[in-house]
Amino acid sequence: MSSLFLYAGAVHAPTEPVGSSLFIYSLIKPTVDSGSSLHMYGNVINSPKQPKGSSLFSYANVLSSSTRLIPKMTSATTPTPFVITSSGSASAGTEAFYAFTRVYGEYFSAPAGVSAFWVAVDMGAITDVDFYKIEEDRLPARNPRDWTIQGSNDNSTWDVIDTQVGISWVAGEVKDFKLASRASYRYYKIDVTDNNGDASYAVLGQFDLYQAAAAEPEPARKLIMTNFF
């Protein structure tokens, strides 16, 4: 006796003897970005023969993921509605949006001899943020050492939502910084007060804001279908 079961775009057509059972245990791990994707892993295990009237069970374990909130920027205003601003850049090719291109080796640079700067992003709407990431850009001494992350809903009054002091880097390093609690603002800004000692330039490598997914209970298993024979 054959049965057909459709779940999450995958078709299982078991050809087990009458009375057998099929158990499917799937691990579904969503990875959400500016375009989302779904990765599915699963094992199909044939159970011992059971009397006629056996059932098909499917369990899913959904793992928490996170959403990257700022898309790959190709200019200070593209794609919309995001707008990237700064306290001023060193030259063409180091403007603030280059810290959001997702390309290692591209970066924002403050003017020569300036070790303090800010870079801000207008999200276009109030957006929840749980953590952020900074990628070092090749010359650790030029990268941020001391900074605050600030949020605003009017681009005028700013609240400090995270403070970091004495952060050092190695080339190519990526660090995550979790906020003490979820922030909800339209505008976010990193305000750097000093780099790691380079007197020539201060830079910001790739910078991203993230929203954490809601936690699933452990184990997060759900019975999908039973008693279909």
Image (cartoon, helix red, strand yellow):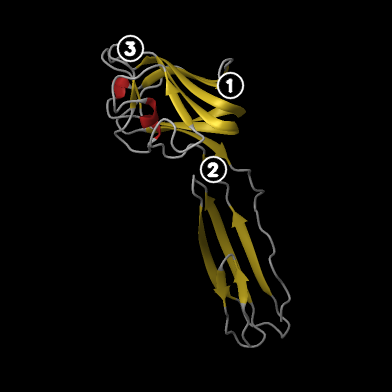
**Residue 122 in the figure: left or right of residue 224:** left
Q: In which quadrant is the N terminus drawn?
A: bottom right
Residue at point 36%, 22% (across, down) = 168
Q: Which numbered disc, 1 or 2, marks the residue closer to the eye?
A: 1
Amino acid beneath label 2: Ser
**Foreground of the two, 170 or 214:** 214
Which structural element holds mark 1?
Answer: strand
What residue does disc 2 label?
66
Q: Which residue is mark 1?
A: 152
The quarter of the picture where residue 146 lies is top left
Instruction: Give percent across and percent down for residue 80.
Output: 49, 37
Q: Which mark is residue 114?
A: 3
User: Label 1 vs label 2: CA separation?
Assistant: 23 Å
Q: Amino acid at mark 1?
A: Ser
Q: Earlier in the sequence, mark 1 or mark 2?
A: 2
Under tag 3, what secondary structure? loop
* Residue at x 64% of width, y 63% of height: 59
Q: Position of residue 129 (x, y in %)?
A: 57, 32
Q: Secondary structure at mark 2?
A: strand
For marks 1 and 3 on the same chain, the one whose residue lies earlier in the sequence: 3
Res 135 visible:
no
